Amino acid sequence: MAKKNTSWGGRFKKHTAKKAQEFSSSIDIDNKLYKEDILGSIAYAEALQNAGVLNKSELSKIKSGLKQIKQKIESGKFNWQEALEDVHMNIESSLEKIIGAAAKKLHTGRSRNDQVVTDLKLYLLGKSKDIQICLTDLLEIIVLKAESEVETLMPGFTHMQIAQPITLGHHLMAWYEMLSRDLDRFKECESRLKISPLGSGALAGNKFKINRKKLAKSLGFTEVTNNSIDAVSDRDYVIEMMFNISLMGVHLSRIAEELIIWSSSQFDYVDLPEELCTGSSIMPQKKNPDMAELVRGGSSKTIGNLVSLLSLIKNQPLSYNRDNQEDKGPLFDSIDYALGSLDITAAMVAGAEFNRDSMLTDVYDGHICATDLAEYLVMKGIPFRDAHAISGKAVQLAESKDFLLSELSLKELKKLNALIEKDVFKHLDPLKSISSKSSIGGTAPSQVSKQIIQAKSKLKI
Ligand code: ARG
């Protein structure tokens, strides 16, 4: 027979069935929130004392009891009980055992519904900071790598086909841009995390003259929620955080994908640090990019986690429903992915050795300056569409002879259009091509250097 739950036992004749307890307990997952739960309870006890619900001695007993519980948990001596459902009831019940009657007053006017939102928001504020620190580390590594590759020529791709010459520094700064938007999103999300629900009670509010604003401030929140019904039903902040993680995961996955492709022997653009690769149990020659593959693979679950949260909320009538307990597993899973993947990606990028020769070889492949030839003709007064067709013919001719565009003779080129002069060959040189792309954000080393200066000043490095 399962234990009778003392938090609501008064209304019940029967004990909760063992199978119901097992089915509904979340303690294995939400015990992660113990620190925030204790912080929230200490602050709430102070608010209760200010409101005259607790006297000074009761408050000090509650505080010292909660501190003891924290120590017990951190030294691994706390006995988490499935029968007590979740972190909130485990801590409250243990408090009663330690300090006696005063503990029974702590939940006055408070519900686990506003308590769990308080805990989660505080927890996410901390995790958001951790993610921002790791993300900033990765951004710094990318920018410093880009700085040493500002002049490194490589082919740029569209449709996975060689498109136009770019620099590796420019490409790495594209990674920077994606992830820097992620960093902004994590920062922006904080403003909504910093709104305290405490004092909303189960759903209708609190009648005990709790000073909600003071209470919020004491926990580091900047505002209080406007509507107690919304406050206990809202999980938007969880969804936002999970969206931010999943979009960052998509970015990390694209970066990982490039590292995987570039490290293949067909590309040979990068050598990944050996200590972050694995071998094969059968093929002795293999050096596999498993960490990058796990960053790519793991990002899928962050998308799944986000979708599961959206559908968890979608059909719930207001206000709180127990469904919400299901938010924590996917949330914690996404957070673990975020921190782990940022860390391993930073190590991969920091230790990546780029093979400039392989990239350069490919720059002289695929008629990479065909667009430059068309643009040369535009500068001679030919409309772009016609210029495009002439350049296309030049590619056809070069292909038929197995030549590079720049290996065609002036005579051959002139046959395609009489306006072509000797100066055309300058425009068929990839180095000249990159330095001509000097529009803001373009691949010219002068521009990429500006992008790097801006990034460094944003990162304060
Ligand atoms: N463990 C619950 C959760 O995560 C706490 C709130 C329970 N509230 C309730 N009315 N049963 O949502």
Image (cartoon, rainbow, N blue to C red):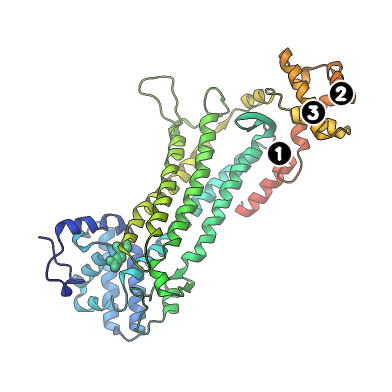
Is mark 3 in CB contact (under 8 Å) with mark 2?
no
Nearer the viewer's eye, disc 3 or disc 2? 2
- Ligand 1, by image quadrant, is bottom left
Residue bearing the label numbered 2: 417
Q: Earlier in the sequence, mark 3 or mark 1?
A: 3
Is residue 32 visible in the rendered image? The answer is yes
Residue bearing the label numbered 1: 443
Residue 436 to residue 404: above or below: below
In space, the residues marked 3 and 1 are separated at their CA atoms by 18 Å
Q: Earlier in the sequence, mark 2 or mark 1?
A: 2
Residue type beneath disc 2: Asn
Indicate the position of residue 164 as horizontal and vertical percent values.
70, 31
Name of the residue lying farthest toward the bottom: 52
Who's the residue at 58% across and 50% down the image? Answer: 180
Who's the residue at 12% across and 67% down the image? Answer: 14
What secondary structure is marked by label 2?
loop
